[in-house]
Amino acid sequence: MDLFKLNLVKKYFSKADLDGVGNAVAMAEDYTSAEIRVKIVSKINKGLKGDIYKQAVLEFEKEGMTKTRDQTGVLILIALKDKRFQILADKGIMAKVKQEVLDKVANLIKTGFQSGKQKEGLCFAVGYLGGILGGVFPRKPDDKNELPNDVVVETDGQKFWRGQKILTEGEAFEKLKPYGPEPDEPKKEEKK
């Protein structure tokens, strides 16, 4: 099956757009030992009941991001049908990078989709993130590219393209959450 026969992907990105995002990831990683990954899925898994955070944790593991040398992986996950995205950063990142930085990255992505310039929003977000990470986690002399820079596009469990991420237009998207266990929800008191 050709990825671009999937109208949902075509609605937001051309092949050239996805290549452009992948190039932005490669350029950002030229200055940092951190690994940035963009992944687009058609929708959040049914069993997760719309929980984009849990989906991101699963995709983080699935893409091998937990295996980076210094725990410095960052995943940008976009669920097209759900019109949501999640940025998930590994422990090494969250120990040295403030949440406000990830919030700024999220805002750049959101603004790009709201203005119909998804590719530009993603490229700006990845470039900004790469600049911050380069200051905190500079490229090491023995650094190697641990993960492909391409955006990963996966629908119905099949990967069609490795290249870039996708987001949707004009919707309000969830704020970023740090990598790790999901925060405990307040317990509801039982009525007596």
Image (spheres, helix red, strand yellow):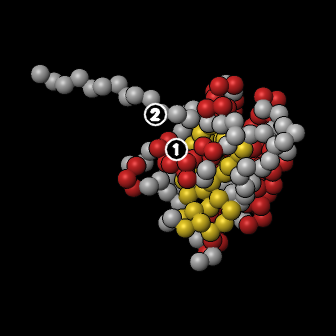
Classify 138 as above or below 58: above
Amino acid on which disc 2 is placed: Glu
Query: Which image quarter: residue 33?
Result: top right
Horizontal and vertical percent position of residue 29: 80, 44
Image-based side of 123 in relation to 5, left or right:
right
The residue tagged with tag 1: helix, strand or loop?
helix
Residue 182, disc = 2
The residue located at (75%, 44%) in the rendering is: 126
Label for residue 57? 1
Residue 142 vs 81, above or below: the answer is: above
Q: Residue at x 61, y 32 (%)?
A: 91
Can residue 119 be seen here?
A: no
Question: Going from the N terminus, do you reach mark 1 or mark 2 first?
Answer: 1
Q: Which mark is residue 177?
A: none
Please provide percent x and percent y for residue 15: 73, 67
Q: Quadrant of the C terminus?
A: top left
From the viewer's perspective, is 11 left or right of 126? Answer: left
